[in-house]
Amino acid sequence: MKKKAQTGLTVLNIGFGNVVSMSRIIAVVTPGSSPMKRMREEAEERGKLIDATQGRKTRAIIITDSDHVILSALQVETINQRFLSGGDKKRKKI
């Protein structure tokens, strides 16, 4: 028996109570390379940079379909695991 699809927005916890819509995420990348540093700087110039690190070291960069660049203090692997498991353990729907 199939369950009915729930309506709502599935969000991904990116650390410290910050969430991102899973359907808007294009990529999750490591911040160390020169192209990623350049992308971060360009996003800041355009006003499309969102810092969700709470003052901690940036360990992942999330790129969205709206051209926003989101900085997270969580490891790329942690975010990928949460994404593949369908978001937050509680499956928050908005």
Image (spheres, rainbow, N blue to C red):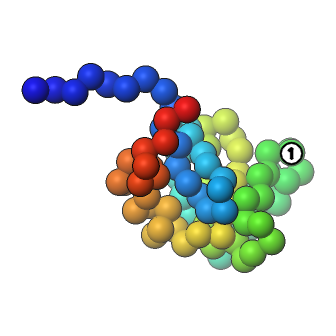
Q: Position of residue 73 (x, y in %)?
A: 66, 70
Q: Position of residue 36 (x, y in %)?
A: 68, 64
Q: Position of residue 66 (x, y in %)?
A: 67, 36
Depth check, front residue: 21 or 28: 21
Depth check, front residue: 32 or 2: 2
Quarter of the figure with residue 34: bottom right
Quarter of the figure with residue 32: bottom right
Q: Residues within 10 Å of mark 1 (few under 14, many from 20)?
A: few
Q: Is residue 77 left or right of residue 3?
A: right
Residue shown at the point (48%, 27%) measured from the top left: 8
Residue shown at the point (56%, 63%) measured from the top left: 29
- Number of numbered markers: 1
Question: What amino acid type is highlighted by mark number 1?
Answer: Gly
Depth check, front residue: 53 or 38: 53
Residue shown at the point (65%, 56%) measured from the top left: 17
Residue 54 appearing in the image: yes
Q: Is residue 63 left or right of residue 37?
A: left
Residue 33 appearing in the image: no
Question: Which quadrant of the rendered structure holds the C terminus?
Answer: top right
Q: Regarding mark 1 in the picture, which secondary structure is present there?
A: loop
Residue sitting farthest toward the front: 90
Q: Which residue is mark 1?
A: 47
Question: Which quadrant of the rendered structure holds the N terminus?
Answer: top left
Q: Does 88 sit above or below residue 36?
A: above
